[in-house]
Amino acid sequence: MSNMTKPIIDIKNMKKSYVLGDETVHALQDVSLQIYEGDFLSIIGPSGSGKSTFMNMLGCLDTPDGGEYLLDGKNVATMKDLELAMVRNVKIGFIFQHFNLLNKLTALENVELPLVYRGMGAKERREKAAACLDLVGLTGRYQHLPTQLSGGQQQRVAIARALAGNPSVLLADEPTGALDSKTSKEVLQLLKELNEKGHVIIVITHDLEVAKQAKRVVRIHDGKVFENGGDWFEPVGINQDGVKEYQRQ
Amino acid sequence: MNLLESIKMALKSIKGNKLRAFLTMLGIIIGVASVITLVGVGQGSSNSVTEEIGSLGTNLLTLSVTDTESVQLKEDQLDQFNELNGISEVAPIVSGRVTAKSGENSTQVSITGTTSSYLTVRDLSLSQGRFLSDMENELRQKVVVLGSDTASTLFPRKNPIGESVQINGVSFKVIGVLESVGSSLGTSGDSVIIAPLSITQRLTKSTTIGTIYLKAQDEQMVDRAKFQVQGVMTTLFPNLSDYYSVSSQEDLMETMSSVSDTMTVMLGGIASISLLVGGIGVMNIMLVSVSERTKEIGIRKAIGANRKSILLQFLIEAVVLSVIGGLIGVALGLGISRLIEVFSSLAISYSPTVTLAAFLFSFAIGIIFGVFPANKASKLNPIQALRQE
């Protein structure tokens, strides 16, 4: 599949279940997945497929019940809060559907935030944050509050924030979900560019059109992961309104 | 993340919600200000009482009879006190209230029947005329010495010396006027009439002596003199020690200062309760703030904030709120104290210790009441926090 030898993310037999009412939901069942340097991966699946749980696992927001999750060779599955926070800060950049910027902070301050938690000095921090904003094409909008920016611009700020810590992995959860199609294209284009610059990008989506932009599409269904998820759905594809069609397959 | 960064963050979040921050601080402000003011009032009055008692002379002993039925001190028994080697002067007192009248002017004053020693025993001085003489006492002369207020009430435009005063209908001749001494322990020292003991006993229809002021030889002799006086009283009135007391100024000072210390503690305690309530207010708002900012906490956690940084953020916010409140409270408290001092006769003592303590207390309250909400924030599950809108 890839000529790279050592995966950045190596997941083996990951399990996660939780109790909902009096029913145990097996959100992830023996999931194994390798992600290599330079990968642009999309994870596609309908709601309830275990997609969100998987994303939380990838993003080190949650720890699995069983299995192994090696991130850069270190097992995340057994880490405690302090180490997990550190991993989230250094190794992973989050991009959310609803941007999740802090509305009371300016664009620059939002981008600085991961570096604040890293304990970086104010001057160095500001320079790095400014460089990241320049990279996503927001030069001159440093002092704008999120509310003064358009949706696309806000998502760019969020991407800049994810980039600021220079993480190995960018994890985007429905990055285009709250954007119109034109802005969506721009954001996806930006993600592609970032991938070309060497960032590993993981996009989680239920939109096949978005998923197909990635080099590698993985489908998640009933807590199990399948490679070549894009081919599985062709030619009909799925979208938000096409749940029934998808179920018929 | 360092402390300075956290403080900046806290200030920013406080600035973003000024009205709420102010209302939160109000409890602390009122608490700190009232601690400072009330303790200041308490200590001030304590100080002024002690000062007043001290100004009466420290070698003064007071023998006061609480039950004049059982303990009937007569004039001829006074010689026994005079003979004591620790005592230099003895001034017996008979007192009562009378109506004094001079022409159109009349006033209700307290009359003090005493002897010539009274002037030296009480360290008084005359502004005009002379004091009572032993002869006048002996001969029951109808002469009086007026306090400065009484003199100016009865003789607003006249020199009172040589004039006559009607006391309960009996005419007295004014022979002297006392220098003003101001009010002491709630009673005015200037609204008095001093007359010979013998004639006062007749006026007030009391034959026994209620109080005797005794002057010890010197300050070192006070305690010894006190024992001697008690000895004389025991021989005169065996087994009646419950009906009279001998006290030095020092005893009085101790009693008074313990009274006003109790008052100070009580006032301070009440004010501290309001400070505590202020602290609960801070906790309340911080809890609201945590649940309002659940999403923010989720975002911060997702981009790498650990529990400690979140805890610190909210704790520092609570502490900064309390400290700003404390500072405003200190300023307000000192301002109010100053105003009270200017516009009323109350003496206020500014105590740096109390001010500092009140401020530090507000700081401590910030920590104590900030820990719970901050801990709650730090333990939020990032996944659930992020999911919240």
Image (tube, helix red, strand yellow):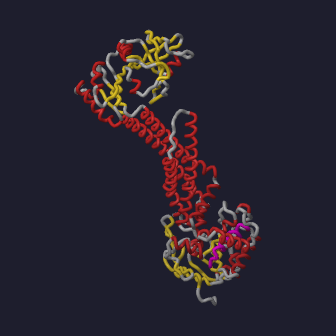
Q: Is residue B140 above or below residue B234?
A: above
Tell me if I can see residue B317 in this picture: yes
Residue depicted at 47% across the width and 36% down the height = B48
**Residue A165 within the magenta-colored segment of the rendering:** yes
Q: Looking at the image, how many numbered discs can be counted on the residues?
A: 0
**Closest to the observer: B140 or B365?**
B140
Residue A240, given in percent of the width and then of the height, sits at 68, 69
Q: Is residue A47 magenta?
A: no
Up-down relation of residue B194 to residue B363 (above or below): above
Q: Position of residue A163 (x, y in %)?
A: 66, 74
Residue A143 in which image quadrant: bottom right
- The magenta-colored residue range is A153-168
Asked whether B103 or B85 is in front, the reply is: B85
Closer to the camera, B291 or B350? B350
- From the image, give the main secondary structure of the stretch colored magenta: helix
Please tell me which residue is depicted at 34% across the width and 16% down the height of the picture: B206
Residue B116 sits in quarter: top left
Q: Is residue B35 above or below residue B129?
A: below
Residue nearer the viewer, B334 or A232: B334
User: Which x, y percent locates residue B273?
Assistant: 47, 45
